[in-house]
Amino acid sequence: MALRKLVAGNWKMNGSLAALSELAGIVEAAQARPDVDVAICPPATLIAPAVAAQPGLAIGGQDCHANASGAHTGCVSVTLLKEAGASCVIVGHSERRADQHETDAEVQAKAQAAIAGGLKAIVCVGETEAQRDAGQAVAIVEGQLDGSAPREGTGETLVVAYEPVWAIGTGRTPTVGDVAEMHAAIRAKLVALLGAEGAKVRILYGGSVKASNAAELLSVPDVDGALVGGASLKAVDFGPIIAAA
Ligand code: 13P
């Protein structure tokens, strides 16, 4: 089943108020492809100004807390993200799994909170290079889905992003064959976990996506879009990726 593609940009801890000027060009590229969903996930402080600058563009967070409120210094709740104008949130990015030691269970709780609060949850999974070299890539990702995929997720509320850790920010990408194998395995797992809705959940590929490789990666079966880091910061880089979807 061909799902509507989603091309999402993860600005990570990059950007600035001044960099929001890039959004105009991104909106232009998005308007040229009304058949593709486009979202930008800037740092939390830029969400509200991004929404103010481009009310028509979907803006998302990069993380949320599983709780609605409370004594959690430095964290951001789903309610706060929504109030700022976010419509989606990335959870379980490998940088957070590594830097903040987030577990599958925590990622699942965050995704559940996001969905319950009305945000689309983009749940990230992906193996390390050592795990791939050991032939464990598919098993690792299946295990991450077992532990972190919210079972109430639907095609509307849940997106999964496959991001091999070794491909993030390195300029390296898996072969088309490896991407196809992994996305087919993720699809089968989602159907096993979520039933019919699992066939409707979009599976994004992420890791060194750029204009020159986007068309090839996005043509792989069950690649329903891309999660883009570095190449999402500038409209001149991100626009062609949207066009390639
Ligand atoms: P790069 O596109 O910079 O490799 O980052 C991918 C990523 O981590 C998106 O979440």
Image (cartoon, rainbow, N blue to C red):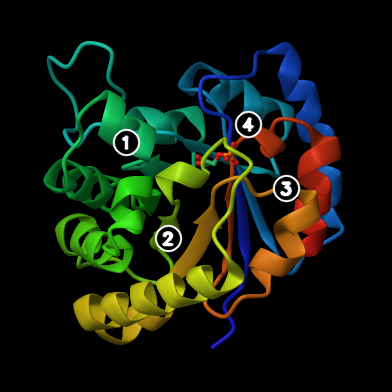
- Label 1 – label 2 distance at C-alpha: 16 Å
> Is there CB contact under 8 Å for labels 3 and 1?
no
Q: Amino acid at mark 2?
A: Val
Which of the two discs, 2 and 4, sits closer to the camera?
2
Residue 238 x/y as whole percent: 76, 43
Q: Is residue 174 left or right of residue 235?
A: left
Which image quadrant shows ligand 1?
top right
Q: Which residue is mark 2?
A: 159
Residue type of the residue flagged with mark 1? Val
Reading the image, the residue beneath label 3 is 210
Badge 4, how many Cα within 10 Å: few under 14, some, many 20+? Answer: some
Report the mark closest to the observer, 1 or 2: 2
| Side (left or right) of 7 relative to 213 | left
Q: Is residue 84 above or below residue 156?
A: above
Contact (CB < 8 A) between labels 4 and 1?
no
Label 2 and label 4: CA atoms lie apart by 21 Å
Which quadrant of the view contains residue 143?
bottom left
Give the alpha-carbon distance from disc 3 to disc 2, as whole Å. 20 Å
Q: Nearer the viewer, mark 3 or mark 2?
A: 3
Camera-side residue: 144 or 233?
144
Residue 78: which disc? Answer: 1
